[in-house]
Amino acid sequence: MCKIFRYECKRLLWNKFFVGLLLVVLFYGWQVLNSVTILGVSHTAPFSPWSFGDYLSRMSPLLWIGALLFLTFFTSPKARRTAVLIDATQVVPRKYVLTRCAAALVGTGLLTLACLVEAAVFYGWYFGWFDWGTLLFPALVTLVPLLIFALGSGWILGSIKPWLVYSWMLIPFVCMALPLPKTLGIWDGSFFNEYPLTLGTLDPSFTMPVTVIMMQCILLAAGAALLFFHSGKNRGS
Amino acid sequence: MKTIQLFPLELRRLLQSRLTWLIVLLTVLSPLAGLILYKPASASTMLSIYLANPALAGGVGGGILFGLLTVFELDRAHRSRVAVLMDAVVSPLCMALVRLLALLAAALLTLIVTMLVWFPISWVLIGSVFGGTDYVLAYLLFMGLALPLSILAAASAYQMTRRADLSLVLFAAFAGLSLTIWTDHWQLCWLNPSVWALSDDFSNFRIFRSVAYMRLTWLAALAGIWTLSYLCVRQYGKGLLGSLARNMRQVYRPMISLLLLTCSGTAYAVQPMVDHSNPDESVMSFYDLPYLEGILCSGRTAQVYPNTTAGTVTGRATYQFQNTSGQAQTVAFGIQPGYTISSVQANGANVPFSVGDYQEYNEVMLEVTVPAEEAVELAVEYSGFPQENRNLSTMQGAAEISTEYLCLENAALAPRLLNVLPDEGMYPATVEVILPSSMMVIPFGTNEAEIVAEHEDGTSTWRYEDNGVGGILYAGDYIRQDIQTDGITIQFYYGRKHQAVMEEAGAVNAVKTVVDYCTEHYGPLSFSTGGTLKLIQSRVSGGGYASNGASLLDEADFTAANLRDSSKGAIPGEVMIHELVHQWWGLGNMFDSFDNTNPWSAEGLTVYTTYRIVKELYDEEYAQKHYVEQWQQAVDDYYLNFYVRNTEYLAGLPEEEQLQISNSLAYVRQYCEMPLKILKAQELVGGEEAMDQILNSLFNRELNWSYPYLTYQEFLDACGLTEEDLTLV
């Protein structure tokens, strides 16, 4: 399986798509950091967890699209045609799907890492600020549920109809346009702008209401469950 | 030839696709989003709400949809695995061109359908101020040009990468940047142009020109990039570089691309719409120039010829100097950055002059060497396209010059003298302007313009006398209504198209009410102007100003949309109220020279009085919410801002961001902090009535002519308070 994993990683990452996507994410990220994050949100520093969370919220649509595009490597009609051959092999279906999923996760993780490193470089460059540990929690709570859910739901949709993955890419934009409840504030970016103002203190430390944490946990669980369900249902796509 | 033969076939194939029709349908419906969800034009004029917003939404929606369709169509052969066969039959280069033309034709068809569908809807929604020219130009520029730009961008991405997924990401990021990060850069937001308002009553050619310029700059850029990507179209099984090398053999192809990109880059760099004024608005170095000794200005004239078709101005200004210094002197003028000086003559002979590079407050300095003669008549000839202040680049439209409207302010009217004192305290000026006979000329001040000549080409020469180094001139399709109040005749000028709305809104009564309120509470105005006051409706501008004998009324003060909006509490004309109140607080000798860093200015008392008028005459709840709470919010936001609290980090910011924060200080302190302090003073002195008495006594105080200005200390003394008492915690 390690060999298959390495192969799938190479297939996903060693091509012009990944390089192009990485460049687009980095360019977009630098524009966000230089234009929006630099001013700070909700009276906090640009390097506060709140401003950093706002940056991640703004980057999440692109990361969401990137994660789903990785899935199209496995759900496209071309990939489906190879499924017949793979079915004839002795690979354990669940393991094989989970291996592919792990490869997609690696790709998404690398993109995310690029965003985080870019922010770290930005903070060091402009503010000489290097206390990156404080940003770990907002990064985890913002991105991990989102991207796991993107992979889980995207994989299920892609296995139904490949074009559904492309439609699913529009979800972040729909979320931004709709008046979502506050528990989904991370999805439309409002949480990091509005919640610190309700805490009544200056430069509040990073906290989240239980309902938001619950919602993120539900998303994470749903994403993981969908991945698990899919891996048990069939092999490949 | 092959391209021409294939084009109808490809277009027919495209139009037989159900996806194409779905995209067309969604694009036709996309202006609907401008009525509900996406409203970038924030002004409350009917054309902003029911024309600009739908057209802009149509541009964004249609642009994104056609970008997706482009990627889908270009990838079709590859996706269906017939690309090899296709390449064997038709040259891939030819096919790329044919596909592009077919998509552009489909976009054009969609635009025509959209315009036909939305024409009657817009007409009904906009009502009496609907105009065919505005409609056609708005849809062509705001929506129509977004479609080819998107098609070119998406096609370029696909032809370079030859991957649908990567093309989609590139296109999404390119569109996303325009919709988010680049929104405040009028030249960069290619998909959603910076349009904040369209005028109902006057023309909108200036903002249309600005959008057209931005779109055409991008059209050249994307056409250049597309031509470059055309060279990357894969041929003979070669990769990107192999195909590029082969396709470049015909030299004209890369040359076209280079030419287009150069044109676009040049157009971007030398754009004529916006000047390069210093973004630091606390710097007013032109006002700090020391006056020259031994030279006085005894009068000036200006002949101004606006070209209402091209939106340009040509003029000739003369200045009479008494140079008793016995030596040549360098006289400085502030001129409009968009103007060029064609000649400067002193007593009929050419004299050297130079125009500087530094610009501030929409002016650039012209320096002229005046010869060492006692009486010098200096004649300056100038012409050009007035540029707008770059600090307001996302709110363009103010420099409108057309047969319906023009506004020439200070240096845009004639070079403004900066460093020469007047003779006997006066700068007498005679201004002549030639305009179409349908336009009424209204000097912004106490003077009256009159027609001195009528010409056979349908134009008239207007003349008026003025005093001062600058001056503001309004002209347009105006009507005048005189309003009699206690001792004042208000000459109310408003656009002819606005008559019905003004009558329905009860504008005349609203004006009378404000004047009566101020007269009753603070006392009558002391007029050196024969008891008349001009109130002039300007094109929608987001604010106003006042001077001796004249105040401005923003077009957005009274619109049909405001009349229907019950949430506004039926408050007519808040800008009008503010600018009328300035006749009591802020003109003549009332306040010392403008100082950005000092919170005590005309604005504090004026904003406070506006709040009182809104509260007492119209809607207390509205006043609390839209005045007091907003002042408090702005003050809190400012003082809680991270950079204001931690100034050591401010220096590390890019200059633009530093200035944005420091510029906001002046606004917050004068327009929000000071009204809050006055409100606090009102509580401490015993309420509104007591404060009214104090303000009445200050307005009618006996002036010390050596320093006639109303100071903060005088205000505090009148209230019996100290500065510390009014500290806001």
Image (cartoon, coloured by chain):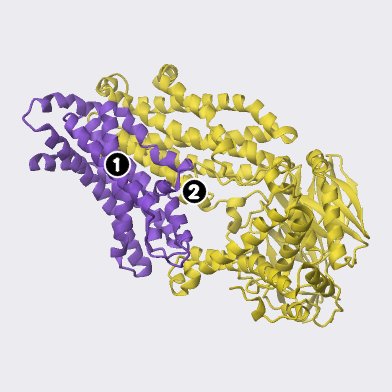
Residue mark closest to the camera, 1 vs 2: 1
How far across and how far down the image is residue A180, in percent? Answer: 45, 43
**Amino acid type, callout 2:** Leu
Is B448 or A153 nearer to us in this picture? A153
Residue B316 seen by the camera: no
Asked if residue B648 can be seen in this view, the reply is: yes
Tell me the distance, in whole angstroms, between the alpha carbons under discs 1 and 2.
34 Å
Both marks 1 and 2 on one chain: no
Q: Position of residue B639 (x, y in %)?
A: 54, 69
**Chain shaded purple:** A
Q: Amino acid at mark 1?
A: Phe
Which residue corresponds to mark 1? A149
Residue at image location 41% in from the left, 17% down from the top: B13
> Mark 1: which secondary structure?
helix
Give coordinates of residue B647: x percent, y percent. Answer: 47, 73
Q: Is residue B699 left or right of residue A166?
A: right
Q: Is residue A221 above or below residue B341?
A: above
Q: Nearer the viewer, residue B335 or B537?
A: B537
Q: Which mark is residue B188?
A: 2
Q: Quadrant of the C terminus of chain B?
A: bottom right
The number of numbered badges drawn on the structure is 2
Relative side of B578 to B177, left or right: right
Helix, strand or loop at mark 2? loop
Q: Chain of mark 1?
A: A
Chain letter for the part of the structure drawn in yellow: B
Question: To which quarter of the image does residue B8 belong?
Answer: top left
* Residue B539 on image: x %, y %: 72, 48
Q: Is residue A163 left or right of residue A73?
A: right
Quadrant location of the N terminus of chain B in the rendered image: top left
**Which chain does the residue under circle 2 lie in?**
B
